[in-house]
Image (cartoon, rainbow, N blue to C red):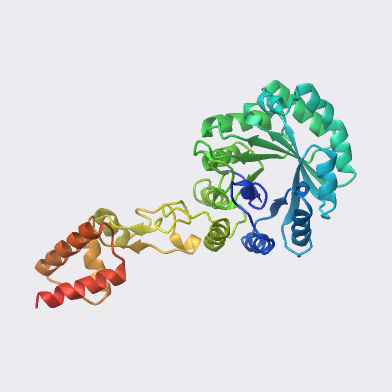
Amino acid sequence: MIAKSLHIIDTTLRDGEQAPGVVFSFDEKLKIAALLDDAGVKELEVGTPIMGECEQLVIREIIQSGFKFKSTCWGRSTEEDMVAAEKTGASRMNISFPVSDIQQAAIGKNRSWVLDRVKPMMAFAHQRFDFIAVGAQDASRADRSFLKEFILACIAEGAHRVRIADTVGTLNPLTTMEFFSWLTGEFPSIEFEFHGHNDLGMATANTVSAALAGCHSASLTVNGLGERAGNACLEEVAAAMRVSANSDCGIHLEKLQLLCQTVAEVSSRRIHESKPIVGEMICRHESGIHCRSLVKDQMSYQAFDPEMFGRKTELVFGKHSGAGGMNHFLRSKGIFLAKEQLTEAMVKMKDAARRAKRAFDYEEAAMMLNASLNDSK
C-alpha cells in the first residue's frame, strides 16, 4: 500500500516541551526552529501563548524570523488563549476542545457544553486568524456519534483542519486504520490531522496507519519528546513513510541526525543507542553471519541505505564475529593472513571481547590484531 504525501507538523516547541522537566531557552527554541526549517518541515506548532509574555516573545520572534515553515499557535477553546495568540502576530491557531466524556468530566463539563461552545469560539477565532485548526482532544476515547456531531459543528463554523488526538495512546495500528477509514469516509473533503501519543509504544505505527487510511497531516515531535512516554517521532514517521510506505513527506532525511542530537542535548533527554533512525547502534553490526552478508550487499541486513540518513554501515568485532567479516576487514587494511593465523587472531579477539563485555571498532581491532601478529612472530 502506498500512502499519499503526509503533511508533517512539528510540535516539539509546544507539546515536546511539555515533557516533565524540559525547558527550552529563547535561543534554543530559535535553534530548533532553524534546524526544523532546514530539514524541510513545513509547519510548526510554535507554542502556547497563554503561558505568558516570555512565551509570546519567542513565538513572535520565530514568526518574524523569515523561516519557510508556517507557524501555528495552540490554545484552549477560550477567548483568553486566543487573545494571547493574537499578541504574537500569529495568523494560524489550533483550538482544542475535550471530546471524550472522561476529559469533559475532568473539567466539570459535558457534551452539551462542548457543542454550545463551538460557534462562539470559532466566530471569535475567525476575527483574529486566517487559519483555524480544531483539536478533538482524546478523540480516540470519544463516543463516535458525538465525535461526528462535533466535527459537523466545527465544519459548519469554518474549521480548516480537524486534529484527531490519541491523547493517552490507546489506539493500535489496526484500530487507527479503521478509525481513519471511518472518518475519511464520513468526511471525504475534510483535512484530518493525527496526533498520536506513545503510551503503549505504538505512536509511530499508528501515525503511519492513519496516513495509509487517508489522513492528510500528522503532528509529531523530534525524538518523540513529550509527556509520559512521549509523542510520535518525527524522524521515525518521516523514515517509515519513505521506506515502508514509499511516500516522500518532503523531509530531508540526512538532516535528521543533527536535529535529533540537538534536541536531545537541549532537553537533557539522551537518545537511546538503539533508537530507530538516529541511535548510534542502528547501522552497527557484530554478528558473523550478518557481517559476511553485509560485505557483499549492505541491504542484506539493513532496511535502508544508511547514506539516506547521512550514516554509514559499521562492522565491529567481538564475541559474535565471524572469520568472513574479520578477513574482509584485514584485507581492506592490506593484511593477508593464513587460515591458522586468522583463527588465532579470532580466538584472541573473542576472548578480549568476553572480558571487556563489548565489541571493538576498526581502530581498536587493528591495534589488537597488530599486537597479536607481533606476538606470534
Q: Quadrant of residue 145?
A: top right
In the image, 121: left or right of 35?
right
Vertical order, 130 against 58 (above or below): above
- Residue ID at (65%, 64%): 31
Q: Is residue 14 left or right of residue 175?
A: right
Q: Is residue 130 visible?
A: no
Q: Nearer the viewer, residue 165 or 310?
A: 165
Tag count: 0
- Judging depth in this view, the residue of 274 and 355 nearest the camera is 355
Q: Is residue 166 above or below residue 92?
A: above
Residue 61 position within the rendered picture, expressed as x and y whole percent measured from the top left? 77, 62
274 left or right, relative to 150: left
Q: Residue, x 81% and y 29% (percent of image)?
A: 153
Image position, residue 244 (x, y; %): 49, 46
Image quadrant in which you'd find residue 215: top right
Q: Residue at x 80, y 25 (%)?
A: 113
Q: Residue at x 60, y 41 (%)?
A: 211
Please tell me which residue lies in front, 334 or 352.
352
- Quadrant assignment for the C terminus: bottom left
Q: Position of residue 229 (x, y in %)?
A: 53, 41
